[in-house]
Amino acid sequence: MNEKQEFILGCIVLVIAIMIIPVSIAVFMHGSSPYSEMENDPVVEAAELAGLSICSVNDSVWDIPGAEGGKTYTFSGNCTDPDERLVVYTQAFNSSASRDAAILSFNSRVIGKLKNPGVPIVVGQYLVYVDDSRGKELSSRIADALDKIENSLDEQFGQ
């Protein structure tokens, strides 16, 4: 290697180091979403905020490490109309690491192959999956309500 190539290689290493250090500090300082224990399933409160009624509730446990159990809810503005229903799945996790691993697993799947269209939302120790395949209007209402609950948790715990 001649002197010019060594200089160029040194500059490249320096530029990469200058870019990597701030990014890695930001990643390590941010961490994951706050993990806080909630007494009640946040979806019930979100449904009330969104003006939705609970049509049915079933217990469920996902086959994921760290999952402690949850529920499958069917919400609607009118429970007698089957076209106006929203299915929401919740699961409590025993740690933020197991909850975040479930999110990574969900995001690694391709829609149509082991993945349904929908939105995973983190609220405290819960991972909430909103199945929006029947329509976006109800799912956006409950997602907005869940965001309000999560924001109030962030303020409460100073995140």
Image (cartoon, grey):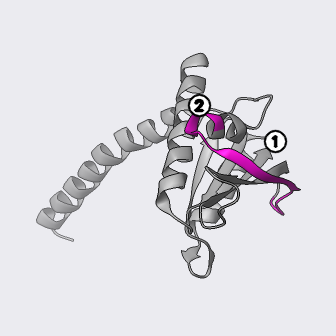
**Residue at (78%, 44%) from the top-left corner?**
92
Q: For numbered disc 1, what is the local secondary structure?
A: loop
**Residue at (61%, 82%) from the top-left corner?**
113
Question: Image height check: is 78 above or below 118?
Answer: above
For the N terminus, the quadrant is: bottom left
Q: Where is residue 79 in the image (x, y as percent from the top left)?
A: 70, 55
Q: In this view, does 27 lie to the left or right of 42?
A: left
Per the image, is 61 magenta?
A: yes
For the C terminus, the quadrant is: top right
Q: What residue type is labelled 1?
A: Asn
Q: For numbered disc 2, what is the local secondary structure?
A: helix
Q: Where is residue 131 in the image (x, y as percent from the top left)?
A: 61, 62
Q: Position of residue 126 (x, y in %)?
A: 71, 43
Distance (Cα) linking label 1 and label 2: 20 Å
**Residue at (54%, 76%) from the top-left corner?**
111
Q: Is residue 32 visible?
A: no
In this figure, which residue is indicated by the disc labeled 1? 94
User: Label 2: how many residues lie within 10 Å, few (<14), some (14-19) or many (20+)?
Assistant: some
Question: Image height check: is 150 above or below 14?
Answer: above
In this figure, which residue is indicated by the disc labeled 2? 149
1 or 2: mark nearer the eye: 2
Figure disc tally: 2
Q: In this view, does 49 lie to the left or right of 8?
A: right
- Give the extent of the magenta segment: 48-64
Q: Is residue 5 visible?
A: yes
Q: What residue type is labelled 2?
A: Ile
**Residue at (59%, 31%) from the top-left corner?**
149
